[in-house]
Image (tube, rainbow, N blue to C red):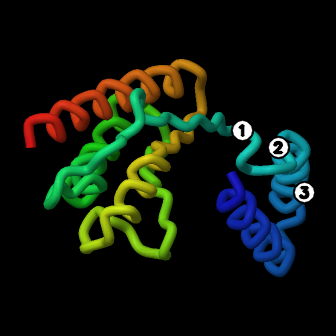
Amino acid sequence: HSETQKTAAALLRLYQKQGKSREAAQLKRDLSAWRREAPADATAAFLHASVRPNPPFSAVPEGFRLLHAVTGHQGYVLKHIAQESRANKVTAELGATDGGDAGGRRASPSTVLEQAAALELHIVASSEEALRRAQQLCEAHLKKVHEQMASW
């Protein structure tokens, strides 16, 4: 982990200043080994996926807050999906054509439709199992949002 390596490097400098050569030498060897083992790109260790609603959201009823329905209050639903699946992160993205989002603000109907059609959930996970489980939970949740919209 990069923060651990930074802390170890600071500790190494402290050991060197204090004349603790044996401890400094051991920490230097450990730090070198960690740096060799670490992936070149920190995000390379993670798996990424996107989930789009199937079928895509084609019409958003007047007053229906799509982004809020997808994410939940303060992102609770997506946080819960990440926690249940052991994914690192799950985020929602609306295709913002005017720089805004239709989730909490008024937008023209055409903008809402364009944003709804471009909705995606992005998943970051450290294992195939977590990624697969998060995808399943996201797909089930988007199906429930479709049902909510239909009954709105």
* 20 is higher (above) or lower (below) than 148: below
Q: Secondary structure at mark 1?
A: helix
Q: CA distance from mark 1 to mark 3?
A: 29 Å
Residue 134: numbered disc: none
| Rendering quarter of residue 103 | bottom left
Q: CA distance from mark 3 to mark 2?
A: 24 Å
Name which residue type carries label 1. Ala
Q: Which residue occupies 19% across, 51% down?
A: 61
Closer to us: 11 or 40: 40
Residue 25: numbered disc: 3
Are the residues at dot 2 and dot 1 in contact (C-beta closer than 8 Å)? yes
Are the residues at dot 3 and dot 2 in contact (C-beta closer than 8 Å)? no
Residue 45: numbered disc: 1
Q: Secondary structure at mark 2?
A: loop
Name which residue type carries label 3. Ala
Sequence-wise first label, 2 or 1: 2
User: Residue 90's x, y, as percent?
Assistant: 44, 44
- 103 on left or right of 49: left
Q: Which residue occupies 26% across, 44% down?
A: 77
- 142 on left or right of 62: right
User: Residue 142's x, y, as percent?
Assistant: 32, 34
Disc 2 target residue:
39
